[in-house]
Amino acid sequence: MIDQVVTFFTTLQAQICAALEAVDGVGTFSLERIEPPMGGLAQPRVMAGGQHIEKAAVQFTHSVGASLPAAATERNPHLSGLPFQAAAISLIVHPQNPLVPITHMNLRFFFVDAETPHWYFGGGYDLTPCYPFDDDIVHWHTCAAKAVGSHYPQMKTACDDYFYLPHRQECRGVGGIFFDDWNQRSFEESFALTRAVGDSFLPAYVPIFERRMEMPFTDAQRAFQLYRRGRYAEFNLAIDRGTKYGLQSGRRVESVLASLPPQVTWIYNYQPEPGSPEARLTEHYLKPQKWI
């Protein structure tokens, strides 16, 4: 099982890095291979200071451990203390242009070789615009729905529920799809669904990036982008289970926190001008709704 997943995730990592390098036109991804003491492989890849991509990270890990971290067993306490293997790919893109949305994707597979073997997939992707365009959002959700078929309503709701900042009472962005503890029917069928999600990411995101990356923007829009990145950092540090898992499992901190934006601001008691695009973002777009 794990070998098939590792092969797919490493191939997908290479495909996504190549596609993002082509879109940016200047930036390139670093490549490191880190072999942990217990086996497996960490392969972080990061682009910084590109022409259109301010920072992007596309991380692959294959972990082998004696005991699952708490973040991985909070919904499956019966697996606590058991040896495991896990494979994951996780990515983030922070664009230069504030009119291009941030995006995130992760896919993961856990395998516990117990008396009764236990395995499951998880992951998904979401879109976080500062200045949303309705046709971008429709395209994004249409690609997601095509990838997962009849599971889309369930996974779309799960995404809205997960990527939510309760202390701000707002969604992180305009959603996408999310699934967890997925082991429906057979390994082959669950793996096929996971591959469909991974293969749909580039067709979902690259067209949006390409049609917005050359659009002119103002200093005020750039300032708002940096302010909204603060929300992204808040979610990753306070809520995201993937960040908690990475820190609890002893992974390299630089890799775990590579998803954080290179520049960000927090503004005390920021109030957007009524009726402005900045106000409309939170009043309209950062709420769960039917996009397609």
Image (cartoon, helix red, strand yellow):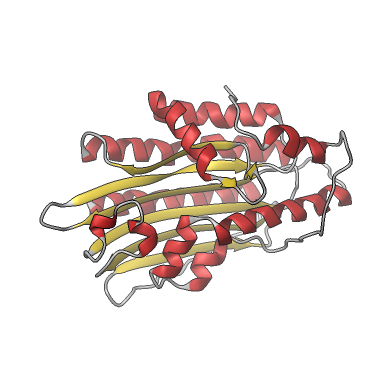
Nearer-the-camera pick, 101 or 184: 184
Left-right relation of 94 to 40: right
Residue 63 picture quarter: bottom left
Who is closer to the viewer here, 269 or 246? 269
Q: Position of residue 143 (x, y in %)?
A: 51, 29
**Residue 113: percent from left, percent from top:** 17, 58
Q: Could you tell whether 186 is left or right of 92 in the image?
A: left
| Left or right: 129, with 86 as reference point | right
Using the image as rendered, state which of residue 273 and residue 92 is in the foreground: 273
Query: In x, y percent, where is residue 126?
Result: 55, 41
Instruction: State which quarter of the image contains the C terminus.
Output: top right
Q: Is residue 266 above or below residue 254?
A: above
Tell me which residue sits at (75%, 35%) in the image: 283
Marker count (numbered): 0
Quadrant housing residue 169: top right
Depicted 267 relative to depicted 161: above or below: below
